[in-house]
Image (cartoon, helix red, strand yellow):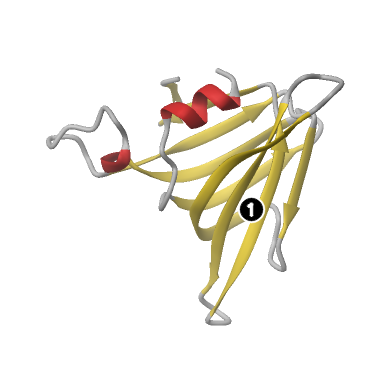
C-alpha cells in the first residue's frame, strides 16, 4: 500500500522502535516495531495490546536519518509522530517525516531522531507474514 494509506490505517504513536535497517542497494528500509495494537481502530479487548512486527518501506527514492546516535541497527526508541512533509514534483511520491525518541541506556540519555523517507510502498509484517 502507499505510505499515505498505511499511515491513515495505522496509528503508530507511542509504538516502540527496536531496530532500523536501511539498505540502499535494495531501496528498502525495515523498522522493527512494537505496535501499540490497543491504539488501532480494529482493536478488540481479547487482542494482545502490543504486537511485534516490521514496517517495510520499498522503492525508496530518498532516505535521511537525522540524530546524534546510530542510524542503522538495533536501538530502543519510541515513535512520536508520522506526517506528510512534501510531495516530490518529479515522481509524485510523498515524503514522510517519522519523529522518534531514541534511548541510550548506557549513557543515560535520550535523543530526538527524525527520519525523512520517500518510498513507493509500505508493508506491515508479523513473524514474516505479510498482513498489509
Closer to the camera, 99 or 28?
Answer: 99
Could you tell me residue 97's position as x and y percent? 65, 44
Determine whether, in the image, residue 98 is placed left or right of residue 88. left
Could you tell me residue 93's position as x and y percent? 73, 23
Q: Residue at x 29, y 30 (%)?
A: 41
Determine whether, in the image, residue 112 is placed left or right of residue 35. right
Q: Secondary structure at mark 1?
A: strand
Q: Residue at x 50, y 52 (%)?
A: 79
How would you rate the neighbour count of disc 1 (Cα within 10 Å): few for under 14, some for 14-19, many for 20 or more? Answer: few
Relative height, residue 30 to residue 91 (above, below):
below
Determine whether, in the image, residue 116 is placed left or right of residue 76. right
Could you tell me residue 117's position as x and y percent? 70, 38
Closer to the camera, 132 or 96?
Answer: 96
Q: Within the image, what quadrant is residue 119 found in?
A: top right
Q: Residue at x 51, y 59 (%)?
A: 77
Q: Within the image, what quadrant is residue 129 found in?
A: top left
Could you tell me residue 75's position as x and y percent? 56, 59
Amino acid at each position: 500500500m502507499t505510505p499515505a494509506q498505511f499511515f491513515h490505517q495505522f496509528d503508530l504513536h507511542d509504538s516502540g522502535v527496536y531496530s532500523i535497517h536501511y539498505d540502499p542497494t535494495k531501496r528498502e528500509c525495515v523498522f522493527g516495531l512494537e505496535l501499540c495494537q490497543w491504539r488501532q481502530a480494529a482493536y478488540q479487548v481479547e487482542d494482545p495490546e502490543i504486537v511485534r512486527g516490521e514496517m517495510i518501506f520499498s522503492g525508496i527514492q530518498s532516505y535521511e536519518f537525522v540524530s546524534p546516535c546510530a542510524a542503522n541497527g538495533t536501538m530502543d526508541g519510541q515513535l512520536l509522530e508520522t506526517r506528510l512533509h512534501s510531495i516530490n514534483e518529479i515522481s509524485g511520491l510523498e515524503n514522510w517525516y517519522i519523529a522518534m525518541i531514541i534511548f541510550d541506556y548506557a549513557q543515560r540519555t535520550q535523543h530526538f531522531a527524525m527520519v525523512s523517507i520517500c518510498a513507493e510502498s509500505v508493508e506491515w509484517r508479523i513473524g514474516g507474514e505479510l498482513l498489509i
